[in-house]
Image (cartoon, grey):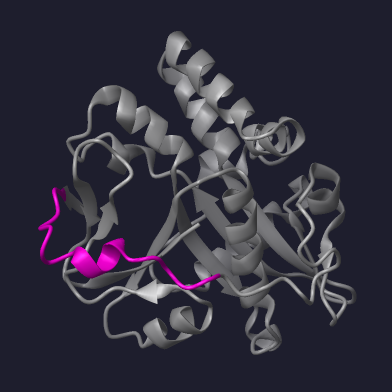
């Protein structure tokens, strides 16, 4: 991935508001705020599938499902290893319990303690959501994390690049077992992810897909904007204009939260 400052004229359309996310009407609680307990138990779809946070016993299935994307994306060991011991999404849980201000407090503490604490913060701000079928177990997975390395290399002042961990979230992967596709599972995973990070007051969600794959139509159906080839994700929430760009073989999708 290549990062650079955007061309203001070229990316003018990227600063417009994204379409509203699809509602979670089919999940229990509908528009109610997400809670730690609710995400642990799972949001129940009309089909009986539960959208919930991953548990230790889900890791190997999640790895297998992520590999189905066929784009070389994997469930990183640093995230997989953090599921069983509760480090994954630990800061997310604090934000749900105590409010988004808890994320700012955690960032301040981590910044004062060095690289190891910052890595733990990134893991704590990440999440792995799974879709659990009542008869077939985990059949879908979504991985989201702050793009820490990208933010550190796009020319932002150091403090702003750190604050960016609380403003920008990357949807790294979403995958559903082939036998359970076309049932709205991926859409529910994406909608839950959007609702989660919107509740935590993130500004922008983005992801990337292979150019020529035809996936732009799918992402647009989920209320996401498929950016044109060569168009970057504009980060206009910072004092210095910046953007995230990729190589010609990939395209971005993005939305405001």
Residue 90, relative to residue 70: is it above or below?
A: above
Residue displayed at 77% across by 75% down: 25
Describe residue 45's horizontal placement relative to residue 187 as left or right: right
Residue 47 in picture, x, y percent from top left: 84, 82
Seen in the picture, residue 173 relative to 227 is either above or below; the reply is above
Point out residue 182 in the picture as x, y percentages from the top left corner.
65, 90
Q: Main secondary structure of the magenta part?
A: loop
Residue 236: percent from left, percent from top: 28, 49
- Closer to the camera, 169 or 128? 169
Asked if residue 6 lies in the magenta stretch, the reply is: yes
Give how far across and how far down residue 34 sits, in percent. Answer: 76, 51
Task: Using the image, determine if residue 167 lies above or below residue 137.
Answer: above
Q: Left or right? Give the position of 13 relative to 4.
A: right
Residue 1 appearing in the image: no
Question: Is 215 positioned to the left or the right of 210 in the image?
Answer: right
Q: Residue at x 10, y 58 (%)?
A: 7
Q: Is residue 168 visible?
A: yes
Camera-side residue of 128 and 103: 103
Q: Is residue 185 magenta?
A: no
Q: Quadrant of the N terminus?
A: bottom left
Q: Give the left or right position of residue 256, taking residue 136 as reference.
A: left
Residue drawn at 70 percent across, 31 percent down: 94
Which residues are the magenta region? 4-20
User: Residue at 67% across / 57% down in the picture?
Assistant: 129
Quadrant for residue 152, please give it: top left
Would you identify the image quadrant in which residue 204 lies?
bottom left
Tally of marks: 0
């Amino acid at each position: 991935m290549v990062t650079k400052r955007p061309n203001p004229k070229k990316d003018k359309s990227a600063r417009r508001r994204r379409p509203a996310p699809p509602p979670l009407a089919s999940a229990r609680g509908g528009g109610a705020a997400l809670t730690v307990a609710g995400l642990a138990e799972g949001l129940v779809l009309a089909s009986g599938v539960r959208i919930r946070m991953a548990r230790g016993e889900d890791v190997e299935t999640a790895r297998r499902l992520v590999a189905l994307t066929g784009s070389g994306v994997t469930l990183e060991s640093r995230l997989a290893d953090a599921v069983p011991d509760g480090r994954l999404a630990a800061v997310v849980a604090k934000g749900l319990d105590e409010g988004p201000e808890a994320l700012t407090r955690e960032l301040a503490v981590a910044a004062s303690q060095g690289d190891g604490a910052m890595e733990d913060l990134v893991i704590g701000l990440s999440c792995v959501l799974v879709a659990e079928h009542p008869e077939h177990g985990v059949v879908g997975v979504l991985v989201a994390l702050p793009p820490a390395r990208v933010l550190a290399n796009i020319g932002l002042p150091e403090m702003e690049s750190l604050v960016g961990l609380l403003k920008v979230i990357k949807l790294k992967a979403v995958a559903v077992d082939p036998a359970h596709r076309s049932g709205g599972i991926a859409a529910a995973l994406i909608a839950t992810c959007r609702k989660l990070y919107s509740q935590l007051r993130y500004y922008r969600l983005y992801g990337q897909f292979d150019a020529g794959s035809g996936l732009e139509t799918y992402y647009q159906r989920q209320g996401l904007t498929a950016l044109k080839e060569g168009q970057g994700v504009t980060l206009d929430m910072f004092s210095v204009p910046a953007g995230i760009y990729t190589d010609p073989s990939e395209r971005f999708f993005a939305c405001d939260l």
